[in-house]
Amino acid sequence: MVAWASNINPAAWPALIVAARKLVLLEPDRASGWLALGNLLMEMDRFEEAADVLSDGAARLPAEPKVHRLLADARQKIGEIDAALAAVETALSLAPHDQATILSRFDFFVYAGRWDRVAQDLDDVTTAAPTRRSVILAHAHFARGGGDPEALLAVCEAALAQQPGYTEALYYKAIALSMLGRDAEACAVIGLDSFVSLAKLPTCEEHIGGTDFLDALAEEILRNPTLVPDPHGKATRGGLQTRALMQVGDKAVPLLLEQIKLAVDRYVDALPALPHPFAIARPMRVNLHAWAVVYPQDGWQKSHLHPDGWISGVTYVTAPRIAGESKYRGPLVLGELNAEQYPHPPPWGVREVEPKPGWIVLFPSFVPHATRPSGLAEQRICVAFDVVRET
């Protein structure tokens, strides 16, 4: 069992935003107010609004590098990469020796695919910050392009030496081992046969105000005002995804989140005693980040992993199937890699999971996964989540 950190009640967010806006109005020449408001909006995934606010803050405080750096983060979240790079370059001009800003600029070069600039700085940044996500991503890019996968393996091992359960380092370690032909070791890292769990949620038999639980849950998700199509930086394609799952007045969603926590507790208690960093480097305290995804018949998710998570999972609310068929359509595909980046089948294979309403699937966050389109008109609705280490 793990200790769960408390999430902020959604009813409290508006008051926090109002307080931060008042601080900005009362003391517009202090960076702290702009940073507090920008960070709150970013926490709520209101990235466009955060970018507008921080743009105003940067205009008001043109010599404050922290405001420009946070503005860069907001611009990157909404896909404005050139504007993000401009903001971080401004921050760096104001604080040319600030290590955090130097590393942020490297991050943006990686995210923007400016590989010539990445190559120039890679050795220095690898030495300064070997566990940084962008460093691992850069080495992975060059390994895929015909570079030395030994370098990718080395940086992953260095990162794991400092953070034994580092999700992204475990994923790319498996990739590097596969590139080197060390398939058995790659399979052992991914652990498809060891760490995947499927179970039925007990709440699917309950009722909310006279409505079946899953029907009530679907209604709350479909009326969620933060549902947006194909949000930037996410794996959803041809579907809708919430930016903030919990809404004021919801009854089924909070019940589901508590059931997810109970399922995670059972999963953690049953983890096999294997000498694997996923099982050994268990966090003492975690948080739950959850979101809903609504797929029409052609909606799907490309192969991805969840770098911020320790455990990831999904619980199904609705799924389509053809009359007379026993299986639901639109499976989750665990282990699948992006064919454009990795044209050869992964040595660990793939495992298709039927999207049965009322069931929950749990797996390590470093396991790559995708979904298939259902091809049927009925919507497929699920709630996906990460169990995140609390630092």
Image: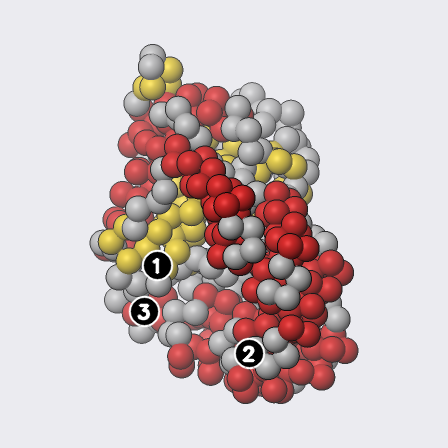
What is the number of the mark on residue 239? Answer: none
What is the number of the mark on residue 281? Answer: 3
Residue 62: give x, y in percent of width and height: 66, 62
Q: Amino acid at mark 1?
A: Glu
Residue 188: give x, y in percent of width and height: 43, 70
Query: In the depicted view, which residue is nearer to us: 102 or 53?
Result: 53
Q: Nearer the viewer, mark 2 or mark 1?
A: 2
Marked residue nearer the N-terminal end (3 or 2): 2
Name the residue tied to disc 1. Answer: 390
Q: How is the image coloured?
A: secondary structure
Marked residue nearer the N-terminal end (2 or 1): 2
**Mark 3 to mark 2 CA distance (whole Å):** 29 Å
Check disc 1 and report its element: helix, strand or loop: loop
Q: Amino acid at mark 3?
A: Ala
Check disc 2 and report its element: helix, strand or loop: helix
Q: Residues within 10 Å of mark 3 (few under 14, many from 20)?
A: some
**Mark 3 to mark 1 CA distance (whole Å):** 13 Å
What is the number of the mark on residue 99? Answer: 2
Marked residue nearer the N-terminal end (3 or 1): 3
For this orientation, the residue located farthest to the top is 210
Q: Is residue 223 above or below residue 262?
A: above
Residue 300: give x, y in percent of width and height: 63, 42
